[in-house]
Image (spheres, rainbow, N blue to C red):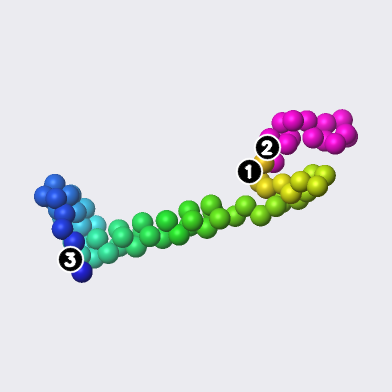
Amino acid sequence: MSLYLPEDMKHRVAEAARAHGLSEEDYMRDAIARVLSDEIVVERRQRVSLPVFEVGDEPVTAERLDDILAEGYGRDGLD
């Protein structure tokens, strides 16, 4: 696999690699691995939307919980 970078990016990679005591190739592999690892974490967070509990007959997800509480659910012991 070959990767072509613009000149300014090549210089930035070279400087960063030197600063970290790595070859440019190792620095780029580490950088790509970090980005991919971060993407996997974000994807896992976004997939979770299972119902947390039910209000009446409505399944409630974490995304909807704040709205339901703001509407007054449970205020004064009434629902």
Residue at image mark 2:
66
Quarter of image, res 35: bottom left
Q: Would you say the residues marked 1 and 2 are in contact, meaning their CB atoms lie under 8 Å apart? A: yes
Quarter of image, res 1: bottom left
Q: Name the residue rendered at 69%, 41% in the picture.
A: 65
Q: Name the residue rendered at 79%, 35% in the picture.
A: 73
- Spatial CA span between label 3 and label 1: 42 Å
Question: Residue 60: x and y, percent?
Answer: 72, 46
Element type at marker 2?
Answer: helix
Residue at image mark 1:
63
In this view, the residue farthest toward the front is: 57
Is residue 18 in sight in this rendering? no
Quarter containing the C terminus: top right
Q: Is residue 58 left or right of residue 20?
A: right
Sequence order check, earlier mark of 3 and 1: 3
- Spatial CA span between label 1 and label 2: 7 Å
Q: Is residue 77 magenta?
A: yes
Q: Name the residue rendered at 70%, 52% in the picture.
A: 51
Question: Residue 6: x and y, percent?
Answer: 14, 50
Residue at image mark 3:
2
Amino acid carrying label 2: it is Asp
- Spatial CA span between label 3 and label 2: 48 Å
Magenta stretch? 65-79
Q: Is residue 63 left or right of residue 74?
A: left
Amino acid carrying label 1: it is Glu
Q: Name the residue rendered at 23%, 65% in the picture.
A: 26
Question: Residue 21: x and y, percent?
Answer: 21, 61
Sequence order check, earlier mark of 3 and 2: 3
